[in-house]
Image (cartoon, rainbow, N blue to C red):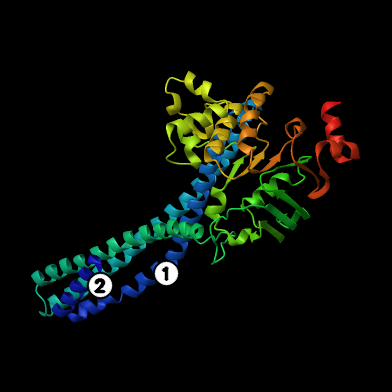
Amino acid sequence: MGIFFTFIGVWAFIFYVNWQMALAVSLTFPFMFIIYRVFRGRIHTAFRAARRSQSDMSNQMQNTLTQIELIKSYASENLEEERFEENSNRNKRDLIQVTHNMAIFSPLVDLVNYIGTAIILTLGAYFVIHDQLTVGQLVAYLSYVSLLQNPIRSLTSLLNQLQESLVSYGRIMDINQVKSSIVEDKGAINFPKISKGINLENVSFAYEKEETIHDITFSIPFGKTTALVGRSGSGKTTITKLIDRLYDLDNGSIKFDRLDIKKIKLRSLRENIAIFSQDTYIVDGTIKDNIIYGKQGASEEDIWQAAEMADIADFIHQQTKGMNTLVGERGVKLSGGQKQRISIARALLKDAPIVILDEATASLDNESEKNIQHALKALMKNRTSLVIAHRLSTIYNADQIIVMSQGRIVEKGKHEQLLKQNGSYARLYNAQFK
């Protein structure tokens, strides 16, 4: 704003001193405007391309660093180096294009300014020869014109910075304008105290138009354990994500007692569901940070009790810093089993009325699995539980077993009943134990 007022003030003054020369200088302004209009789009496009290629290069570098063990195991260093070099060269070309446009833009503006100065010298010489202006007045006038041109040069630099900032702002706004497809109803309420259970009625769901759940209907009775079994890709984990409303179903309904899932506040819904996922998520911080992630402010006693139940307490005691031991980014300092036990401790501490076990013990050895089975049984007692398991030995005692295949329910019943039917469940059982 200061540059603008300086420009207006100086221009008004030189117009007052000699309006003919001021008018002559003003003839250069349209050329500056044309130059700005031409290069504004070019510079903006170049900056946008440079930001995009820089982002691609950073993402590729991050992926390389986080997958370093995989890269070394497959001796793929040369492949990753080629990919990084390709992204780096593209970013270099984009930055050169930015510099090229800015290197042309600024000198062109200076050239127009020099032409304006030449016009002043020519007209000033004419006025001096005809005694309409003294040499001293001409020198002073040139100083005033210089004061007029300085704000223009500053404005040129500011416009370049503005284009760069607009590109960054545009990328931020692109992210901010992305709207979640999961939206609460206006009259959504807190999670109700259920007494009957969870009902899935004619539920269908598709990932990018490829239907993975086909018109399924079943109930998860209150206070009982329901198990989902089936081959990989049959849709078991998708159902857990629909119940936690990480996705919205395409057809049908999911109800808690008689209340539709869409009428429950998202935060309240997820606060009342504890999930043991087959994908262990570890945050960068301490062991304690990870255990209390779902229940901030938990007491030390409750934290250690959850750790004991998850069979991770002995490992924590062995560490010099105990609960304050750093686990590293994505838990790189932990084994797969340790990550899973910490994840189980996190869910145990949450103490939610609905429990979902999605391959909760997949990364544990048989001994560790036995050690926490009693804790999981205690957790699921009098709670509405949904268990997904490939190890059928973990779901013998389920109140209800649902067998899925290709997104459909093919069998339903208890362990002994399903074995007698000699169907899909029996084949899965025989494949594991015979």
| Residue 181 image point, x, y percent | 60, 60
Q: Position of residue 273 (x, y in %)?
A: 59, 46
Disc 2, disc 1: CB below 8 Å? no
Figure check: 221 above or below 310? below
Q: Give SS at disc 2.
A: helix
Closer-to-camera residue (385/118): 385
Q: Residues within 10 Å of mark 2 (few under 14, many from 20)?
A: some
Q: Decide which of 117, 412 is in the foreground and name it.
A: 412
Precedes in sequence: disc 2 or disc 1: 1
Per the rendering, the mark at residue 37 is: 1
Q: Residues within 10 Å of mark 1 (few under 14, many from 20)?
A: few
Does dot 1 land on a helix, a strand or a loop?
Answer: helix
Res 412 → quadrant = top right
In three-dimensional space, the C-alpha distance between marks 2 and 1, rounded to whole angstroms, equals: 24 Å
**Left or right: residue 173 compared with residue 148:** right
Direction from residue 272 to residue 40 in the image, left or right: left
